[in-house]
Amino acid sequence: MDDNAEQQPLTAAPAYPEAQLAKAFTTALTHEDPATRRRAEVRGQRWREVLAGMASGRLTVGSRRPVDGLPAWVTPEVVRGGFATGTASAGGPLQEYETATARILGVPAERRALFAHCLTEPGLAWLWSLLDSGHYEIGVPEEAALLTLAWLVRHGETDAALDLAAELEPFADRLRFLPRPAEGPAPDATAAVHRHTVSDAAGTLKRRRPNTAVETQREALAVWQPFGDELLVHWLRTARDGRVLELAPDADWLTHAEMLLGRYRRLAAEHTFAGKHRNPKENLGILRAALEETVAGRPLDARRLGLLRHAVESMVRRRGLPGSAAHTALRRCQAEQAALPSHHALAQLMLRRLAGLPQETGIPDVAPLLVAVTGEESRETGLPAGAAVPPVIRRVVESALSAPLGTLVERGVVPSAEVLAELVPQLVAATTTQAYREETLRTLMAANYRAFRSRRSLLLLNLERQVRVEELPWVRAVSGQRSAVLGKPDGQGALAVLRQLGELAVQAFPGTILPNPLVREFGVLERQCGLGAPFVEELAADIFMGTFSPKFLTAARVAGDLLGGTLYERYYGIDYPAIAGLATAEAGAAPTRSHGAGTSPGFARLCAERAGPASRSWSVAANGTVIEQAQILTTHNLATLVHRVGIAPRPGWADLARRCFVTVCRLTARVHGNPRPLSTIKDAAYAWRQMVFHLSLCPPDAQRRVIAGLCEETARHPAHVATRLAPALAGLALVAGGGTFGADGTADGGRARRFLGWSTGGHWMR
């Protein structure tokens, strides 16, 4: 779910939770992995809580206050689809740190007792010490409440502190308002951010299990093939002219045979990956079984003797006699291969290296961790000195790199816009809290913001919007401590960060639309610097009700200011002057509201008209066609970033357009043989739209060169890509040359087409 009022589910019926419960129940019963079964059991319990809460009336699905008795600011536990379980994220049994703190403070291990103690002089002194040192963490926003209260008391804001205490007190027995002690202060996110902590990376490595296939091969090379050679040599001692048992076994031979069989039993008990040695049809199994019969004094029958002689002959024929040059070279090569350390063993070594680092932060320099196995480590672990860390383990460690966001993107630690959106709150928290005049309050509010951004969005009805960070009581209590505007002309503050993040997102992932979590962070920064720049979210087609907030029309007007008369306006058949007139008319009219929220009926009507007659009936596909028209008219935030924020990505618009088309081709290649290709076609159309936007900002000569070179790019992909994209390429060339599409978005008898992603019928690209 996303932070906007337009995403409304059609129903709050229990069908979806029931289906999710059934899936979790099936997984918990049938999955082969015990850990997966346990996780499914936990999911199932949460879905049972959802259904029980809905049945009892304790849960109001679709409300921003979904849990009866809890205000909207309380962080709810939310499961897939935005359903609240009825449990507060800050509730449940006492955490280990709460119990430890109660013991240190000498109070009963109860939340109300801890809360009450923190309002006393010793309790406030303890909180002040945490504020001064910064040695605390905020896991959920509620854990910042008592620290904020202590800050207010220390700075003479007694009335605000009393009001905050009164608002928190009714929940003191249920919610944890106590901060978590930490080893040190949080790192400065303006200098560096990290995707994962050291603890996260270590957890990933701990979960890594030996690769059964690799370990089986290693065991076969290191254990069973050498043992098989020993059996072969032993049988050859009875051979004459290459035929074994032509010579009768003597006492020494039988004694050594018993020793070999005893060693076999020990090896079989210790090395359990490979199983061929147990197979009576395999050469090793034949040699061993014949040896057991002979040692037991039972003569081999004709069949078993024939199998034995055939096995010996085939082994010698394939690899040569043991001790020969060819056989020795082969076994030496196999021994070297078997001696290579397993990824699992190297993961254990990496855990040793990570253990000495602070666990709850990133890693400023990963290079020392990624060196080859040292001599000392070799002596301690048995791993060969000089063994390199394999890429799969390198990637886990590099995921915890702490560096500027741009560096993480360049090094591939941030592989997508979605991952970028996960990291941006660290930077936004540090940036927006610069408005607080006092240092310890800035640190506290930054930690609170990071925790708040982990709050999962609720499924909402009736145009309600998600709770914002400024609605939290402890944030409201210190709102007067903020300066007015962060967009400073010297390049510092929220505007500079917004421009930096906008350029990074568009430059790094030009063929991907901005994900909603990133759009939300852009909105936070925009509000701080007072740009009045509208950022709009991607709406979900399955819960869309046909309404748009006024900011969509504003965003379309901004797009018109930038793109009027360009290729983009002509390609998509937009009348931007008419949109400007619509915006002016709605601005002068009485606001239109639905369920208390403002809407733009004119914009909704325009999108529906552009989507065509099929959009008048409800379906997911029909909704998608309307939403896509809204994205086309607004450029889904690209025009706002360029025209209002002032981004100028390097190395330029022509390069971005080419890279967008590479994404289009890559996605189109996935359509072939795909039984459900529509989501892929949709993403390809979105990348195409962004390509047209970037092309529209190119000088005419550069624009022509890019369009002329698109066919060369299709030639680098499977042949069907060029075939599928031919109508779209013809349509782009048509409009770039001054032509236009017909009312149905086609020209030249359908050989040229406007590329849209959503369709209520069969999409032509299929």
Image: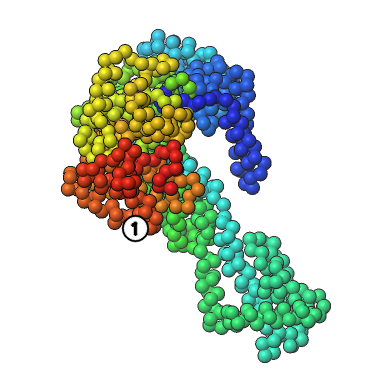
Residue 519: percent from left, percent from top: 36, 32
Residue at 54 percent across and 50 percent down: it is 208
Q: Residue furthest right?
A: 298
Question: Against 444, is 750 above or below?
Answer: below
114 and 598: which is toward the camera: 598
Residue 695: percent from left, percent from top: 24, 43
Q: Residue furthest bottom?
A: 241
In the picture, measured across the screen, residue 61 lies left or right of residue 193, that is right
Residue 522: percent from left, percent from top: 33, 31
Q: Residue furthest top?
A: 159
The image quadrant of residue 58 is top right
755 and 334: which is toward the camera: 755
**Residue 186 visible, this orientation:** no
> Colour scheme of this structure image?
rainbow
Q: How many labels sit on residues?
A: 1
Question: Against 545, is 321 above or below?
Answer: below
Residue at 51 percent across and 69 percent down: it is 336
Residue at 33 percent across and 27 percent down: it is 606
